[in-house]
Image (cartoon, grey):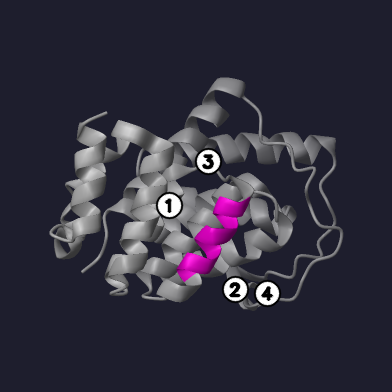
């Protein structure tokens, strides 16, 4: 049984990313880049551009102003392709950007999300794992990593990633909701209810529709679950 909650929240970050790129006509500032590239499994991920096969090393020369403008335009095209569910184009454009700018936040996000949406969660996990090494203070990056890990059945790792996202964004009730869903999948009923209570404290009545999802059927008759639901209805 797989939860719809991580996917729904995952899709919401895609929408936010697309709106951001479309409305501002610029790419997110990348001031949080690490100065040194860490060695991870992502170093072994090959990026296919046309007929060439380029090894991702993270040590390429950073692009100049003219190249940056071209890459920004390509990122906008990639974001538009992602929004239109043209995942092949989104993946191709994102990979092209990463050849020239391996730490590009937008390209990593689009590549990871496109891989996730095309049922390639293992590759998506690798991309997001790499992204966390560059953007250690971004809760969305850790949340996306957690969602990918949950689809792989790596529940404990997923919870650790989402816990880090929560540390960076303590008021994020949607993250707590996802953690509850993952706990249900991992048969941790009491812990799931605890996370739901914390989510209720942050989200209030906005949580109620999510409680109707089938993922929570196995704990629906638990006293703790019923108490949360009734309390929210009485608000």
Would you name the residue on which mark 1 appears?
A: 176
Marks 3 and 4, Cα distance to the nearest angstrom?
34 Å
Q: Along the polypeptide, which appears first: circle 1 or circle 4?
A: 4
Marks 2 and 4, Cα distance to the nearest angstrom?
6 Å
Q: How far across and down, in percent of the image, does residue 101 sit? A: 73, 53
User: Do tag 3 and tag 2 residues touch (Cβ < 8 Å)?
Assistant: no
User: Do tag 1 and tag 3 residues touch (Cβ < 8 Å)?
Assistant: no
Q: Identify which residue, 178 or 24, lies in the foreground.
A: 178
Q: Is residue 29 magenta?
A: no
Would you name the residue on which mark 2 appears?
A: 45
* Badge 2: residue crowd in 10 Å (few <14, some 14–19, many ≥20): some
- Give the numbered dot on residue 43: 4
Q: Along the polypeptide, which appears first: circle 3 or circle 4?
A: 4
Relative to 139, 159 lies left or right: left
Marks 1 and 2, Cα distance to the nearest angstrom?
32 Å
Q: How far across and down, in percent of the image, does residue 107 sit? A: 60, 49
Q: Which residues are magenta?
A: 158-167
For the N terminus, the quadrant is: bottom left
Would you name the residue on which mark 3 appears?
A: 171
Q: Residue at x 53, y 41 (%)?
A: 171
Q: Is any atom of residue 230 visible in this view? A: yes
Disc 4 element = helix
For the C terminus, the quadrant is: top left
């Amino acid at each position: 049984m797989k939860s719809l909650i991580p996917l729904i929240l995952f899709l919401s970050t895609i929408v936010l990313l697309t709106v951001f790129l479309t409305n501002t006509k610029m790419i997110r500032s990348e001031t949080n880049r690490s100065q040194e590239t860490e060695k991870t499994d992502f170093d072994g991920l090959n990026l296919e551009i046309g007929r060439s096969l380029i090894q991702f090393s993270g040590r390429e020369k950073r692009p100049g102003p003219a190249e940056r403008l071209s890459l920004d335009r390509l990122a906008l095209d990639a974001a538009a392709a992602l929004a239109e569910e043209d995942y092949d184009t989104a993946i191709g454009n994102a990979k092209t950007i990463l050849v020239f700018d391996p730490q590009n936040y937008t390209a990593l996000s689009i590549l990871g999300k496109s891989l996730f949406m095309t049922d390639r969660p293992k590759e998506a996990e690798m991309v997001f794992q790499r992204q966390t090494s560059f953007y250690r203070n971004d809760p969305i990056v850790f949340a996306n990593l957690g969602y990918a890990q949950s689809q792989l059945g790596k529940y404990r790792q997923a919870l650790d990633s989402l816990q880090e996202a929560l540390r960076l964004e303590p008021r994020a009730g949607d993250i707590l909701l996802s953690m509850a869903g993952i706990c249900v999948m991992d048969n941790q009923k009491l812990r799931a209810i605890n996370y739901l209570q914390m989510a209720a404290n942050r989200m209030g009545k906005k949580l109620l529709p999510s409680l109707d999802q089938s993922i929570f059927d196995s704990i629906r008759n638990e006293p703790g679950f019923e108490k949360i639901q009734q309390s929210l209805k009485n608000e």
